[in-house]
Image (cartoon, grey):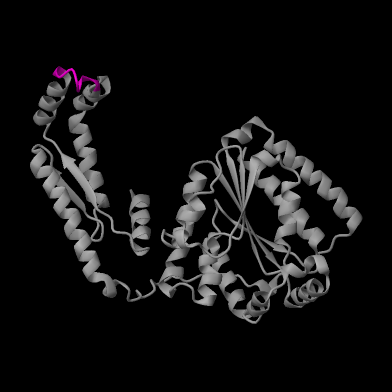
Protein backbone atom coordinates (compact mmCIF):
# COMPACT_ATOMS: atom_id res chain seq x y z
CA UNK A 1 0.00 0.00 0.00
CA UNK A 2 2.91 2.34 0.67
CA UNK A 3 4.20 1.55 -2.82
CA UNK A 4 0.79 2.32 -4.33
CA UNK A 5 0.70 5.71 -2.57
CA UNK A 6 4.19 6.62 -3.85
CA UNK A 7 3.30 5.45 -7.37
CA UNK A 8 0.17 7.60 -7.43
CA UNK A 9 2.14 10.56 -6.05
CA UNK A 10 4.60 10.22 -8.93
CA UNK A 11 1.72 10.21 -11.46
CA UNK A 12 0.16 13.25 -9.80
CA UNK A 13 3.44 15.14 -9.86
CA UNK A 14 3.72 14.34 -13.57
CA UNK A 15 0.34 15.97 -14.18
CA UNK A 16 -2.01 12.97 -14.14
CA UNK A 17 -5.58 13.27 -12.88
CA UNK A 18 -6.41 10.18 -10.80
CA UNK A 19 -10.02 9.19 -10.09
CA UNK A 20 -10.59 6.04 -8.02
CA UNK A 21 -14.07 4.55 -7.71
CA UNK A 22 -15.13 1.85 -5.26
CA UNK A 23 -18.51 0.33 -6.15
CA UNK A 24 -20.10 -1.11 -3.01
CA UNK A 25 -22.78 -3.77 -2.66
CA UNK A 26 -24.29 -4.95 0.62
CA UNK A 27 -23.97 -8.66 1.31
CA UNK A 28 -27.66 -9.52 0.84
CA UNK A 29 -27.78 -7.42 -2.36
CA UNK A 30 -24.75 -9.22 -3.78
CA UNK A 31 -26.37 -12.60 -3.06
CA UNK A 32 -29.60 -11.62 -4.82
CA UNK A 33 -27.64 -10.34 -7.82
CA UNK A 34 -25.61 -13.55 -8.13
CA UNK A 35 -28.79 -15.66 -7.91
CA UNK A 36 -30.51 -13.53 -10.56
CA UNK A 37 -27.54 -13.80 -12.93
CA UNK A 38 -27.37 -17.55 -12.36
CA UNK A 39 -31.06 -18.09 -13.24
CA UNK A 40 -30.86 -16.23 -16.54
CA UNK A 41 -29.49 -18.50 -19.34
CA UNK A 42 -27.89 -15.48 -21.04
CA UNK A 43 -25.92 -14.40 -17.95
CA UNK A 44 -25.37 -17.73 -16.18
CA UNK A 45 -21.78 -17.92 -17.46
CA UNK A 46 -20.88 -14.89 -15.33
CA UNK A 47 -21.38 -16.78 -12.07
CA UNK A 48 -18.91 -19.57 -11.32
CA UNK A 49 -17.68 -21.39 -8.23
CA UNK A 50 -15.14 -18.61 -7.78
CA UNK A 51 -17.85 -15.95 -7.38
CA UNK A 52 -19.67 -18.04 -4.76
CA UNK A 53 -16.40 -18.78 -2.96
CA UNK A 54 -15.70 -15.03 -2.80
CA UNK A 55 -19.24 -14.41 -1.55
CA UNK A 56 -18.67 -16.78 1.37
CA UNK A 57 -15.69 -14.60 2.35
CA UNK A 58 -17.64 -11.36 2.02
CA UNK A 59 -16.96 -10.19 5.58
CA UNK A 60 -13.23 -10.83 5.27
CA UNK A 61 -13.08 -9.03 1.92
CA UNK A 62 -14.97 -6.09 3.41
CA UNK A 63 -12.55 -5.68 6.33
CA UNK A 64 -9.51 -5.85 4.05
CA UNK A 65 -11.10 -3.48 1.54
CA UNK A 66 -11.91 -0.93 4.25
CA UNK A 67 -8.31 -0.98 5.42
CA UNK A 68 -6.97 -0.56 1.87
CA UNK A 69 -9.38 2.30 1.11
CA UNK A 70 -8.51 4.16 4.31
CA UNK A 71 -4.76 3.72 3.82
CA UNK A 72 -4.62 4.71 0.13
CA UNK A 73 -7.15 7.55 0.10
CA UNK A 74 -5.14 10.78 -0.11
CA UNK A 75 -6.04 14.44 -0.54
CA UNK A 76 -5.03 14.45 -4.21
CA UNK A 77 -6.27 10.94 -5.04
CA UNK A 78 -9.19 10.10 -2.74
CA UNK A 79 -11.39 7.06 -3.08
CA UNK A 80 -14.91 7.82 -4.30
CA UNK A 81 -17.32 5.26 -2.85
CA UNK A 82 -20.42 4.66 -4.96
CA UNK A 83 -23.43 2.65 -3.86
CA UNK A 84 -23.80 0.10 -6.65
CA UNK A 85 -27.33 -1.21 -6.15
CA UNK A 86 -29.20 1.17 -8.47
CA UNK A 87 -27.58 1.26 -11.95
CA UNK A 88 -29.07 4.70 -12.76
CA UNK A 89 -27.58 6.24 -9.63
CA UNK A 90 -24.30 4.37 -10.16
CA UNK A 91 -23.73 5.49 -13.75
CA UNK A 92 -24.81 9.10 -13.22
CA UNK A 93 -22.70 9.50 -10.08
CA UNK A 94 -19.55 8.19 -11.79
CA UNK A 95 -20.17 10.21 -14.96
CA UNK A 96 -20.85 13.45 -13.08
CA UNK A 97 -17.75 12.96 -10.90
CA UNK A 98 -15.52 12.50 -13.97
CA UNK A 99 -17.05 15.51 -15.73
CA UNK A 100 -16.67 17.78 -12.68
CA UNK A 101 -13.05 16.68 -12.17
CA UNK A 102 -12.15 17.36 -15.81
CA UNK A 103 -13.81 20.78 -15.73
CA UNK A 104 -11.99 21.69 -12.54
CA UNK A 105 -8.63 20.59 -13.97
CA UNK A 106 -9.18 22.59 -17.17
CA UNK A 107 -10.17 25.67 -15.16
CA UNK A 108 -7.02 25.33 -13.05
CA UNK A 109 -4.83 25.26 -16.19
CA UNK A 110 -2.52 28.26 -15.72
CA UNK A 111 -2.47 27.88 -11.96
CA UNK A 112 -1.13 24.32 -12.19
CA UNK A 113 1.60 25.51 -14.59
CA UNK A 114 3.27 27.46 -11.77
CA UNK A 115 6.40 25.46 -10.73
CA UNK A 116 6.10 23.72 -7.39
CA UNK A 117 8.74 24.33 -4.74
CA UNK A 118 11.34 21.58 -4.58
CA UNK A 119 10.81 19.09 -1.74
CA UNK A 120 13.47 18.98 0.95
CA UNK A 121 16.09 16.27 0.51
CA UNK A 122 17.64 14.43 3.44
CA UNK A 123 21.30 15.34 3.90
CA UNK A 124 23.98 12.92 2.72
CA UNK A 125 26.66 11.92 5.20
CA UNK A 126 29.57 12.07 2.79
CA UNK A 127 29.04 13.21 -0.78
CA UNK A 128 30.74 11.05 -3.38
CA UNK A 129 33.26 13.02 -5.43
CA UNK A 130 34.68 11.86 -8.76
CA UNK A 131 37.87 13.87 -8.34
CA UNK A 132 39.02 11.54 -5.56
CA UNK A 133 38.97 8.41 -7.73
CA UNK A 134 42.24 6.61 -8.41
CA UNK A 135 42.83 6.76 -12.17
CA UNK A 136 46.24 5.11 -12.03
CA UNK A 137 44.94 1.57 -12.74
CA UNK A 138 46.52 0.17 -15.85
CA UNK A 139 46.32 -2.99 -17.95
CA UNK A 140 48.46 -4.02 -20.89
CA UNK A 141 47.07 -5.51 -24.11
CA UNK A 142 48.31 -9.07 -23.47
CA UNK A 143 46.86 -9.21 -19.96
CA UNK A 144 43.64 -7.65 -21.22
CA UNK A 145 43.13 -10.21 -24.00
CA UNK A 146 43.58 -13.06 -21.54
CA UNK A 147 41.23 -11.64 -18.89
CA UNK A 148 38.65 -10.54 -21.45
CA UNK A 149 38.38 -14.07 -22.84
CA UNK A 150 37.95 -15.56 -19.34
CA UNK A 151 35.31 -13.03 -18.32
CA UNK A 152 33.30 -13.40 -21.53
CA UNK A 153 33.43 -17.18 -21.23
CA UNK A 154 32.17 -17.01 -17.63
CA UNK A 155 29.35 -14.64 -18.54
CA UNK A 156 28.28 -16.86 -21.43
CA UNK A 157 28.13 -19.91 -19.17
CA UNK A 158 26.17 -18.02 -16.50
CA UNK A 159 23.42 -16.88 -18.86
CA UNK A 160 23.10 -20.39 -20.30
CA UNK A 161 22.37 -21.75 -16.83
CA UNK A 162 18.74 -22.89 -16.32
CA UNK A 163 18.65 -20.71 -13.19
CA UNK A 164 19.15 -17.57 -15.28
CA UNK A 165 15.74 -18.22 -16.87
CA UNK A 166 14.16 -17.15 -13.57
CA UNK A 167 15.75 -13.69 -13.53
CA UNK A 168 16.50 -10.84 -15.92
CA UNK A 169 19.46 -8.50 -16.24
CA UNK A 170 19.06 -4.74 -16.59
CA UNK A 171 22.35 -3.02 -17.38
CA UNK A 172 22.72 0.76 -17.14
CA UNK A 173 25.68 2.52 -18.73
CA UNK A 174 26.20 6.15 -17.78
CA UNK A 175 29.38 8.18 -17.86
CA UNK A 176 31.33 11.16 -19.07
CA UNK A 177 31.38 11.87 -22.81
CA UNK A 178 34.09 9.75 -24.48
CA UNK A 179 34.46 7.56 -21.37
CA UNK A 180 34.05 4.34 -23.37
CA UNK A 181 30.43 3.30 -22.78
CA UNK A 182 30.06 1.93 -26.30
CA UNK A 183 33.25 -0.12 -26.06
CA UNK A 184 32.12 -1.55 -22.74
CA UNK A 185 28.72 -2.50 -24.16
CA UNK A 186 30.32 -4.26 -27.15
CA UNK A 187 32.48 -6.43 -24.90
CA UNK A 188 29.38 -7.46 -22.93
CA UNK A 189 27.30 -8.32 -25.99
CA UNK A 190 30.25 -10.25 -27.42
CA UNK A 191 29.56 -12.89 -24.77
CA UNK A 192 25.79 -13.08 -25.33
CA UNK A 193 23.43 -14.78 -27.75
CA UNK A 194 22.04 -11.95 -29.95
CA UNK A 195 18.52 -13.29 -29.34
CA UNK A 196 18.82 -12.71 -25.58
CA UNK A 197 19.53 -8.97 -25.40
CA UNK A 198 18.42 -5.56 -26.60
CA UNK A 199 20.43 -2.34 -26.55
CA UNK A 200 18.34 0.76 -25.87
CA UNK A 201 20.13 4.01 -26.76
CA UNK A 202 18.55 6.92 -24.92
CA UNK A 203 18.41 10.36 -26.52
CA UNK A 204 16.07 13.32 -26.11
CA UNK A 205 12.46 12.15 -25.56
CA UNK A 206 10.05 12.12 -28.48
CA UNK A 207 6.75 14.02 -28.49
CA UNK A 208 4.94 10.81 -27.53
CA UNK A 209 7.35 10.17 -24.66
CA UNK A 210 7.01 13.73 -23.37
CA UNK A 211 3.25 13.25 -23.12
CA UNK A 212 3.73 10.43 -20.56
CA UNK A 213 5.37 10.31 -17.11
CA UNK A 214 9.12 10.23 -17.74
CA UNK A 215 9.65 6.65 -16.51
CA UNK A 216 7.11 5.31 -19.03
CA UNK A 217 9.59 5.05 -21.90
CA UNK A 218 11.91 2.91 -19.78
CA UNK A 219 9.22 0.55 -18.47
CA UNK A 220 8.50 -0.37 -22.10
CA UNK A 221 11.95 -1.91 -22.52
CA UNK A 222 12.27 -3.96 -19.33
CA UNK A 223 13.28 -7.52 -20.36
CA UNK A 224 11.42 -10.71 -19.66
CA UNK A 225 13.12 -13.37 -17.54
CA UNK A 226 16.16 -14.98 -19.13
CA UNK A 227 17.03 -11.84 -21.10
CA UNK A 228 19.13 -8.66 -20.97
CA UNK A 229 18.27 -5.06 -21.65
CA UNK A 230 21.27 -2.75 -21.93
CA UNK A 231 20.53 0.95 -21.52
CA UNK A 232 23.09 3.25 -23.14
CA UNK A 233 22.12 6.19 -20.92
CA UNK A 234 18.95 5.82 -18.94
CA UNK A 235 16.33 7.24 -16.56
CA UNK A 236 19.21 8.96 -14.77
CA UNK A 237 19.04 11.68 -17.40
CA UNK A 238 16.41 13.31 -15.18
CA UNK A 239 19.01 13.98 -12.43
CA UNK A 240 21.93 14.62 -14.81
CA UNK A 241 21.42 16.33 -18.17
CA UNK A 242 17.86 17.52 -17.43
CA UNK A 243 19.02 18.96 -14.12
CA UNK A 244 22.18 20.64 -15.42
CA UNK A 245 20.65 21.95 -18.66
CA UNK A 246 17.43 23.12 -17.00
CA UNK A 247 15.15 20.84 -19.04
CA UNK A 248 13.05 20.16 -15.94
CA UNK A 249 12.28 22.13 -12.79
CA UNK A 250 14.22 21.73 -9.56
CA UNK A 251 11.14 20.11 -7.99
CA UNK A 252 11.12 17.50 -10.78
CA UNK A 253 14.73 16.36 -10.45
CA UNK A 254 14.72 16.52 -6.64
CA UNK A 255 11.75 14.14 -6.37
CA UNK A 256 13.21 11.90 -9.08
CA UNK A 257 15.72 10.34 -6.68
CA UNK A 258 12.95 8.68 -4.67
CA UNK A 259 10.97 7.76 -7.79
CA UNK A 260 14.01 6.09 -9.34
CA UNK A 261 14.71 4.11 -6.17
CA UNK A 262 11.08 2.93 -6.11
CA UNK A 263 11.27 2.00 -9.80
CA UNK A 264 14.41 -0.08 -9.32
CA UNK A 265 13.01 -1.72 -6.21
CA UNK A 266 9.97 -2.87 -8.18
CA UNK A 267 12.25 -4.35 -10.86
CA UNK A 268 14.31 -6.19 -8.25
CA UNK A 269 11.21 -7.59 -6.54
CA UNK A 270 10.24 -9.26 -9.83
CA UNK A 271 13.63 -10.87 -10.39
CA UNK A 272 15.47 -8.05 -12.13
CA UNK A 273 19.20 -7.74 -11.49
CA UNK A 274 20.00 -4.04 -11.89
CA UNK A 275 23.68 -3.44 -12.67
CA UNK A 276 24.62 0.24 -12.99
CA UNK A 277 27.93 1.60 -14.24
CA UNK A 278 29.30 5.12 -14.13
CA UNK A 279 32.36 5.34 -16.39
CA UNK A 280 34.58 8.16 -15.28
CA UNK A 281 37.63 9.73 -16.90
CA UNK A 282 39.72 12.75 -16.00
CA UNK A 283 39.16 16.09 -17.70
CA UNK A 284 42.59 15.83 -19.36
CA UNK A 285 41.85 12.35 -20.72
CA UNK A 286 38.53 13.55 -22.13
CA UNK A 287 40.27 16.40 -23.97
CA UNK A 288 42.77 13.95 -25.43
CA UNK A 289 39.99 11.67 -26.71
CA UNK A 290 37.98 14.58 -28.12
CA UNK A 291 40.97 15.75 -30.17
CA UNK A 292 41.67 12.21 -31.34
CA UNK A 293 38.10 11.90 -32.59
CA UNK A 294 38.38 15.15 -34.53
CA UNK A 295 41.37 13.94 -36.54
CA UNK A 296 40.31 10.31 -37.03
CA UNK A 297 37.98 9.87 -39.99
CA UNK A 298 35.92 6.94 -38.74
CA UNK A 299 35.56 8.53 -35.27
CA UNK A 300 34.71 12.06 -36.33
CA UNK A 301 30.97 11.43 -36.15
CA UNK A 302 31.33 10.84 -32.41
CA UNK A 303 32.35 14.41 -31.62
CA UNK A 304 29.85 17.26 -31.87
CA UNK A 305 29.53 20.84 -30.66
CA UNK A 306 27.26 19.52 -27.91
CA UNK A 307 30.15 17.46 -26.50
CA UNK A 308 32.31 20.58 -26.26
CA UNK A 309 29.43 22.52 -24.70
CA UNK A 310 28.90 19.80 -22.07
CA UNK A 311 32.62 19.86 -21.31
CA UNK A 312 32.37 23.52 -20.37
CA UNK A 313 29.89 22.46 -17.66
CA UNK A 314 32.23 19.81 -16.24
CA UNK A 315 31.96 21.05 -12.62
CA UNK A 316 28.15 21.15 -12.68
CA UNK A 317 27.96 17.61 -14.04
CA UNK A 318 30.52 16.45 -11.48
CA UNK A 319 28.33 17.78 -8.67
CA UNK A 320 25.19 16.18 -10.16
CA UNK A 321 26.93 12.80 -10.54
CA UNK A 322 28.10 12.88 -6.93
CA UNK A 323 24.57 13.49 -5.65
CA UNK A 324 23.11 10.89 -8.01
CA UNK A 325 25.44 8.16 -6.76
CA UNK A 326 24.90 9.12 -3.12
CA UNK A 327 21.12 9.11 -3.37
CA UNK A 328 20.49 6.18 -5.72
CA UNK A 329 23.18 3.63 -4.84
CA UNK A 330 21.15 1.09 -2.85
CA UNK A 331 21.66 -2.46 -1.63
CA UNK A 332 19.53 -3.85 -4.46
CA UNK A 333 20.91 -1.54 -7.17
CA UNK A 334 24.36 -0.23 -6.24
CA UNK A 335 26.44 1.92 -8.55
CA UNK A 336 29.74 0.56 -9.82
CA UNK A 337 32.10 3.44 -10.57
CA UNK A 338 34.61 2.49 -13.27
CA UNK A 339 37.88 4.38 -13.54
CA UNK A 340 38.03 4.42 -17.33
CA UNK A 341 41.22 6.28 -18.25
CA UNK A 342 42.56 2.86 -19.25
CA UNK A 343 39.95 1.24 -21.52
CA UNK A 344 41.31 -2.26 -21.01
CA UNK A 345 41.02 -2.01 -17.25
CA UNK A 346 37.51 -0.53 -17.52
CA UNK A 347 36.14 -3.26 -19.79
CA UNK A 348 37.42 -6.07 -17.60
CA UNK A 349 36.03 -4.41 -14.47
CA UNK A 350 32.61 -4.12 -16.12
CA UNK A 351 32.52 -7.78 -17.13
CA UNK A 352 33.70 -8.95 -13.73
CA UNK A 353 30.98 -6.98 -11.97
CA UNK A 354 28.27 -8.35 -14.26
CA UNK A 355 29.46 -11.91 -13.69
CA UNK A 356 29.60 -11.42 -9.92
CA UNK A 357 26.09 -9.93 -9.72
CA UNK A 358 24.48 -12.57 -11.92
CA UNK A 359 26.32 -15.38 -10.15
CA UNK A 360 25.06 -14.09 -6.79
CA UNK A 361 21.50 -13.82 -8.12
CA UNK A 362 21.33 -17.38 -9.47
What residue is at 41 percent from the left and 61 percent from the top? 211
Residue 55 lies, with reference to residue 104, above or below; the image says above
Q: Position of residue 245 (x, y in %)?
A: 53, 76
Q: Position of residue 214 (x, y in %)?
A: 45, 60
What residue is at 20 percent from the left and 65 percent from the top? 104
Q: Is residue 232 left or right of residue 81?
A: right
Magenta span contains residue 122: no
Give the position of the C terminus as an image quadrant: top right
- Residue 345 vs residue 306, the one in the foreground: 306
In which image quadrant can residue 67 be found? top left
In which image quadrant can residue 312 be found? bottom right
Q: Is residue 210 left or right of residue 336?
A: left
Magenta-colored span: 39-45
Residue 20 lies, with reference to residue 337, above or below; the image says above
Residue 291 lies, with reference to residue 65, above or below; the image says below
Asked whether the viewer can see residue 126, the reply is no
Residue at far bottom of view = 312
Asked whether the viewer can see residue 290, the reply is yes
Q: Is residue 94 left or right of residue 76?
A: left
What residue is at 84 percent from the left and 63 percent from the top? 138
What residue is at 36 percent from the left and 56 percent from the top? 6
- Residue 327 vs residue 204, the one in the foreground: 204
Amino acid sequence: MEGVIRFEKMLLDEGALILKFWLHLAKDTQKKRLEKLEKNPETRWRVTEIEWAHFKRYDKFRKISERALLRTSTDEAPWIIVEGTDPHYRYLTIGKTILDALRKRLDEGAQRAVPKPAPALPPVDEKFQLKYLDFSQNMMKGEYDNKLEKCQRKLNLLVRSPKFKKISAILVFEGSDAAGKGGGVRRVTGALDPRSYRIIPIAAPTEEERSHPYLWRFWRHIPRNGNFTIFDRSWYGRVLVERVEGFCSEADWVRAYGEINDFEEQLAQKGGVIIKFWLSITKAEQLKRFKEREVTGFKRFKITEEDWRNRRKWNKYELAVGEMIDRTSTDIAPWTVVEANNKYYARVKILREICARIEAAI
